[in-house]
Structure formats: structure tokens, C-alpha cells
Image: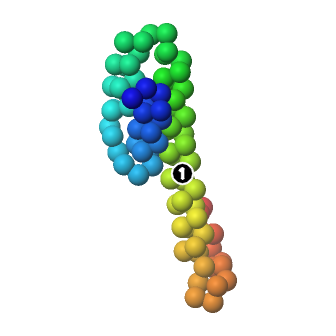
Amino acid sequence: MGGPGLFIIGFLDSSFLSFPELNDLLLVGMVMKHPHLLIYYALMATLGSVAGAWRSFSSRAKAARRSSRNVSGRTTSRPACA
């Protein structure tokens, strides 16, 4: 699995699917086997989580912008996000 696997699990956990504590358990297990790769594994898990959260945020912001338009195509008087 390695670093790319931690990135993918972190991305999915922060965006579409929920894997409670799975990334943490994988990270601990992998560091126990390869302690010299601690920084790499932690960085990959963190970057995956941040990328997933950003993806989720951007897709929801885009949906909010779309929903703020009325039938005529003009934006409503209220902002979509307060």
C-alpha cells in the first residue's frame, strides 16, 4: 500500500466516503514496520486528507453558486454562503 495508499484513503475519507480511524491505524502499522519512513507516510496521509477536503469544499461551493441563481439566470439578492 505505502504512501500512495495512505493518500488515497485520506482523500476518500475527507471527501466522499468515511473510513473512521482507518488512515490512523494504517499509518501506525506502516511506521512500526518502517520507522525511517515516518515523515513520508505522515505527509502522504495529510496531503490526501487536505486534497479530499478541498475537493469536497470546491464541489459544494460550486453547487451553492448554481443554486443561488433563479429561473431568469440572475443571482438572488441573498448570498449563497454567509
Task: Name the residue at 55% across, 67% down.
Answer: 64
Query: Measured from the top left, where is residue 19 in percent x and y?
Result: 33, 40
Q: How many marks?
A: 1
Height in image: 53 above or below 21?
A: below
Q: Would you say residue 45 is visible in this rendering?
A: no
In terms of depth relative to the viewer, which is nearer, 30 or 65? Answer: 30
SS under mark 1? helix
Query: Measured from the top left, where is residue 25 in percent x and y?
Result: 33, 25
In terms of depth relative to the viewer, which is nearer, 5 or 65? Answer: 5
Quarter the N terminus occupies: top left
Q: Which residue is mark 1?
A: 55
Task: Name the residue at 54% across, 74% down.
Answer: 67
Mark 1 crowd level (few <14, some 14–19, many ≥20, 10 Å Cα): some
25 horizontally vs 69: left or right:
left
Task: Name the residue at 52% across, 29% down.
Answer: 44
Residue found at the far front of this picture: 1
Task: Name the residue at 54% across, 67% down.
Answer: 63
Q: Would you say residue 27 is visible in this rendering?
A: yes
Task: Name the amino acid, label 1.
Answer: Arg
Residue found at the far top of this picture: 36
Query: Measured from the top left, where is residue 45 in percent x and y?
Result: 48, 31
